[in-house]
Image (tube, helix red, strand yellow):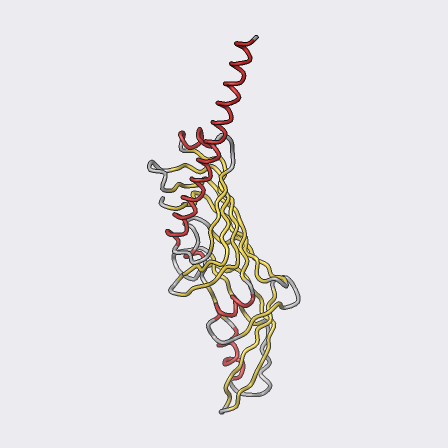
Amino acid sequence: MRILRVVVIIGVVLGALFVGADRWAVGYAENQLADRIQARQGLAGSTEVEIHGFPFLTQALSHDLDRVDLRLKGVEVAAEGRKTRLSELDASFRGVRLNGDYSGGTAERAEGSALITYADLTAASQTGATLSYGGAPGKVKVTASVDIAGRKLSRSVISTITLVDAPDARGGKIVRVHAEEVPGEGIPGLERLVRRQTDFDRNLEGGLPAGLQLSALTSDEAGVHLTLGGSNVAMAGS
């Protein structure tokens, strides 16, 4: 019985050591992967990574991770030379195959969501227009100032914010803000001038992890919510 007790105690101790080593290893891997993702994407905000599954060490040895969750806060994505700030981006990567030196990997599939606040959408417009909630899903209110014969006129319009196909051969989706109606008020050229300030397109996919694409969007009081998805999505150094 004494021998059996010793064996049990040794087993418990070794098990605890293994669990402790496994948890230390997964924490280290999460921090390293977060740093690599942030460096690869050129992100200015914070990056958090959570690797799921136990034990982690056996997954790492096989170079296969079941699931990796990524959370980005206050980050800027750059596409076509223009930066757009995302208040937050959450993504879940499934079936991640790590590359040989563990510097990154590729996920079989990924899905997630992102939020752009109206303050950040206002900055993204780059026209001086101010954007706010339009009172219904998929609607935004755009207020702009135009110069007519030396007079400054302020106009507000309700615009639809949608995803449309990119107009070039690269494919993908772009975010489009388009005023539903601009009253001309009998002033020649007023609608054209207002639309110059209120209507715009933004390509965000160029700043997202390779393979992650926009699939849907809506708006509410908090801002514009984007739905993301994709297959063969690159992570970090891959």
Q: Give the residue furthest to the right.
A: 135
> What x and y, as percent, mark residue 146?
51, 83
> What x and y, as percent, mark residue 214?
50, 54
> What x and y, as percent, mark residue 83?
43, 64
Looking at the image, residue 61 lies above or below residue 96:
above
The image quadrant where one finds the C terminus is top left
Looking at the image, residue 225 lies above or below residue 233:
below
State left or right for residue 180 relative to residue 13.
Answer: right
Q: Give the residue furthest to the front.
A: 2
- To which quarter of the image does residue 30 belong? top left
- Viewer-nearest residue: 217 or 97: 97
The image quadrant where one finds the N terminus is top right
Looking at the image, residue 73 lies above or below residue 133:
above
| Number of on-image labels | 0
> What x and y, as percent, mark residue 48?
48, 48
Q: Give the residue furthest to the left.
A: 101
- Viewer-nearest residue: 35 or 157: 35
State left or right for residue 158 relative to residue 107.
Answer: right
Name the residue rendered at 63%, 63% in the picture. 221
Name the residue rendered at 39%, 46% in the picture. 236
- Viewer-nearest residue: 230 or 3: 3
